[in-house]
Image: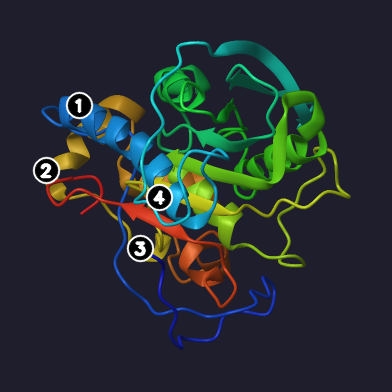
């Protein structure tokens, strides 16, 4: 298990009032990999999905009875008995219903749950892209919820993290309906979704960005998070030069334009860059975090 480290860093503007400060370090990009990386990314996503189950077995998130206390972590065999319920409304924000798809195993539970968050440069992507991962996890004893959230440029930060927080609160508030153990909810995401998963895991009570989507009285805390190719310090992120044409082809803009659409600023010293960076919020007491990066990823260098 890889956890995010903490060290003193420069003070942040009071407007955002982060509860802790972190070192400055380079971070990577997200969704929409350059040609030639699609197959490798697909394999890595499948590995990361199974990795979540393996990591969970070591921190008490695995389905009950999956392993003995003194046994090495294992992934339970697939049961092929998962069911899917689509277009479940988990909140409302920006005048729109917020929806997720719930894939769950057979049985009475309660089961551990994982919130799945798709990538796409903060402005594209669909929750259905993660159907395969959701099914793989449900077949192994997890309730997997793939959520949609508000996208840029129509909705800028912190809309997306507010929606991800709302989704966690919904799963906890509706734990009995979905046969979820409310103490064993994790977050998983790739690219932009990984960035959101990290923020949900690292933001604490009173740090803000809860939103008004619903279930305000319920905690958004997660027991663990997995991020695949996610940026952790936005002020330092940019794709390799060779990947910029691919970003412009897919999104109509490069990495700087994606940040502008998401954050509303080009000034990397602006408070919003720090507020939207997971590293800003790292501190003692955070849940376990597994951050997966590829050494040859041109978008997450």
Residue 229 drawn at (x, y percent): 32, 46
The answer to which of 202 and 29 lies nearer the viewer is 202
Location of mark 2 (residue): 242
Q: Which of the two labelled residues, at mark 2 and mark 4, occupies the earlier sequence position?
A: 4
Location of mark 3 (residue): 2
Residue 48 drawn at (x, y percent): 33, 39
Location of mark 1 (residue): 38
Q: CA distance from mark 1 to mark 3?
A: 25 Å
Frontmost of labels 2 and 4 is 4
Horizontally, is 171 left or right of 55 in the view?
Answer: right
Q: CA distance from mark 2 to mark 4?
A: 34 Å
Q: Do the residues bearing badges 1 and 2 touch, measured as CB atoms within 8 Å?
A: no
Residue 106 drawn at (x, y percent): 60, 16
Residue 191 drawn at (x, y percent): 38, 41
Q: Label 1: how many residues lie within 10 Å, few (<14), some (14-19) or many (20+)? A: few
Mark carried by residue 55 = 4
SS under mark 1: helix
Frontmost of labels 1 and 4 is 4
């Amino acid at each position: 298990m890889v956890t995010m480290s903490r060290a003193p860093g420069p003070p942040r503007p009071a407007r955002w009032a982060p509860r802790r400060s972190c070192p400055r370090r380079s971070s990577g990009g997200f969704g929409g990999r350059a040609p030639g990386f699609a197959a490798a990314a697909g394999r890595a996503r499948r590995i990361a999905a199974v990795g979540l189950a393996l990591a969970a077995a070591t921190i008490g998130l695995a389905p009950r009875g999956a392993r003995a206390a003194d046994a090495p972590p294992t992934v339970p065999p697939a049961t092929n008995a998962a069911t899917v319920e689509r277009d479940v409304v988990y909140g409302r924000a920006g005048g729109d219903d917020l929806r997720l798809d719930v894939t769950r195993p057979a049985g009475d539970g309660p089961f551990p749950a994982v919130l799945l968050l798709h990538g796409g440069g903060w402005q594209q992507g669909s929750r259905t892209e993660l159907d395969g991962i959701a099914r793989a996890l449900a077949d192994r004893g997890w309730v997997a919820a793939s959520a949609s959230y508000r996208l840029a440029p129509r909705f800028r930060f912190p809309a997306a993290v507010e929606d991800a927080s709302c989704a966690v609160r919904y799963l906890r508030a509706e734990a009995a309906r979905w046969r979820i153990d409310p103490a064993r909810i994790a977050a998983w995401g790739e690219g932009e979704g990984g960035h959101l998963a990290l923020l949900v895991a690292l933001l604490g009570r009173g740090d803000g960005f809860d939103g008004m989507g619903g279930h305000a009285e319920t905690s958004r805390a997660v027991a663990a998070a997995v991020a695949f190719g996610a940026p952790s310090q936005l002020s330092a992120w940019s794709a390799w030069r060779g990947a910029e044409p691919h970003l412009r082809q897919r999104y109509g803009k490069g990495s700087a334009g994606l940040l502008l659409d998401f954050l509303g600023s080009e000034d990397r010293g602006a408070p919003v860059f720090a507020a939207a960076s997971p590293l800003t919020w790292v501190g003692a007491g955070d849940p376990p975090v597994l951050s997966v990066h590829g050494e040859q990823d041109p978008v997450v260098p």
